[in-house]
Image (cartoon, helix red, strand yellow):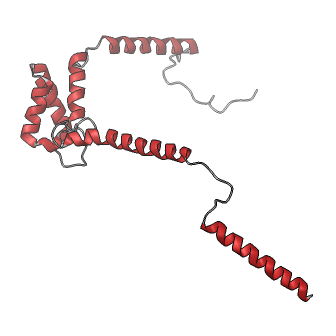
Amino acid sequence: MKIGRFEHITRSNNAPIPNFNFMWVVALFMICCCIATAYAQTETPRTAEPDAAIASKLEELLTTVYCYCGCTRETIKVCVCETAVMIEKDFRNRLLAGQTVEQIRTNYLDTFGPQYYAVMPAEGINLLAYIMPAVILVLIGGVAFFALRRFKQQPVTSDVSEGPNQQVVDTTVKQVEAELEQYKRQN
């Protein structure tokens, strides 16, 4: 009989080694997973999320004003600096305190200036920027309409008209015929 590599190792306390069956390992793993899932579902969230109305108002605020941090000109929602996070927390606290979106936006723009308003107001010279694209499209459409209309009205003539060019052609033909007759007489 052949002796294996590890048969010469003896146990010091002669205690039986527990024989874990594979099924017991799987069952223990499943129980641990169920306990962890149940714990995660019953745990209260660390930060209470505002209700849908406040979330939509906060979204409107974050997308309509620029961050004053000095980074590239981005709205507070897009900016990733600490200043934007601080402004977002301030806006959320003000909304929870009962201020309206217009009050918070007006206060922010009064503090940092109107250049931080991401939406161009439709008043004064800015109104021109809203109207001009439509005016330009109408003008281009009108020019194209009248150009096509005029192009369709002009008849296409294939024959040569009776004019100064026709007289030149007639005299040239007569001259060529005369020279041809003269050539025939000489030969």
Q: State whether residue 82 appears in this view.
A: no
Q: Nearer the viewer, residue 18 or 116?
A: 116
Q: In the image, what residue occupies the spot 68% across and 30% down?
A: 4
Q: In the image, what residue occupies the spot 10% across and 19% down?
A: 98
Quadrant of res 163:
bottom right
Where is residue 103? Give x, y as percent: 9, 27
Q: Quadrant of the C terminus?
A: bottom right
160 horizontally vs 16: left or right:
right
Where is residue 184? Give x, y as percent: 89, 83
Q: Nearer the viewer, residue 6 or 122?
A: 122
In the figure, 24 relative to 69: above or below? Answer: above
In the figure, 53 relative to 4: above or below? Answer: above
Which residue is farthest right?
187
Which residue is farthest bottom?
186
Q: In the image, what residue occupies the spot 48% across and 21% down?
A: 13
Q: State whether residue 78 appears in this view.
A: yes
Q: Nearer the viewer, residue 46 or 169?
A: 169
All told, the count of numbered labels is 0
Where is residue 93? Give x, y as percent: 13, 25
Q: Nearer the viewer, residue 165 or 40?
A: 165
In the figure, 160 relative to 168: above or below? Answer: above
Q: In the image, what residue occupies the spot 57% across and 15% down?
A: 22
42 horizontally vs 123: left or right:
right
156 horizontally vs 148: left or right:
right
Quadrant of res 38:
top left
Q: Quadrant of the N terminus?
A: top right
Where is residue 51? Give x, y as percent: 23, 15
